[in-house]
Image: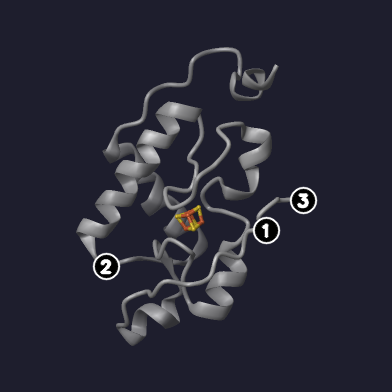
Amino acid sequence: METADNAPGYPPRKKSREDAHRFIERVAKHNGWVVNPDRQFVDDLAEGLAVNYNRHGYFLCPCRDGDGVRRLDRDIICPCDYLAPDQKEFGHCFCGLFLTPEFAAEGQAPSQIPERRPEEPGA
Ligand code: SF4
């Protein structure tokens, strides 16, 4: 049954927006990335991450529609599989949340970039 994918055997603890902010800061620090300096923008993404976590049990990318099944969404669980190539090509991830230090130093705002995820992942 698909929902078994999402059930680790106990209900996951609910995440607040502040929890999502801490997650964002921790991931950025660990990887040497820079969090988008637009605080309102990041706050909106943190809210989206928290909502997705509480709905699905994992930090589904807040800029994408997932299936709600971990197995099918695993490539778009934050930080997603497409972050590295997107940072390499554009200097930031698809959402514009995590910037490379070089991109951040230029002081530009992230722009909309093409979706790198295949329409049918794994196809
Ligand atoms: S694009 Fe990837 S790294 Fe950026 S917020 Fe979405 S899941 Fe996270």
Q: Earlier in the sequence, mark 1 or mark 2?
A: 2
Rendered image: mark on residue 122: 3
Q: Which residue bears the numbered disc 1? A: 118
Residue at the spot x=33%, y=37% of the render?
A: 19
Distance in Å between CA atoms under marks 2 and 3? 34 Å
Q: Secondary structure at mark 1?
A: loop
Query: Depth-wise, is mark 2 or mark 3 nearer the camera?
Result: 3
Q: Are marks 3 and 1 in contact (CB under 8 Å)?
A: yes
Q: What amino acid is at disc 3?
A: Gly
Distance in Å between CA atoms under marks 1 and 2? 29 Å
Q: Earlier in the sequence, mark 2 or mark 3?
A: 2
Check mark 3 vs ligand 1: CB closer than 8 Å? yes or no. no
Rendered image: mark on residue 37: 2
Residue at the spot x=48%, y=50% of the render?
A: 64
Q: Secondary structure at mark 2?
A: loop
In this rendering, position of residue 47 left or right of residue 9: left
Residue 4 pos. (x, y %): 65, 18
Q: What amino acid is at disc 1?
A: Pro
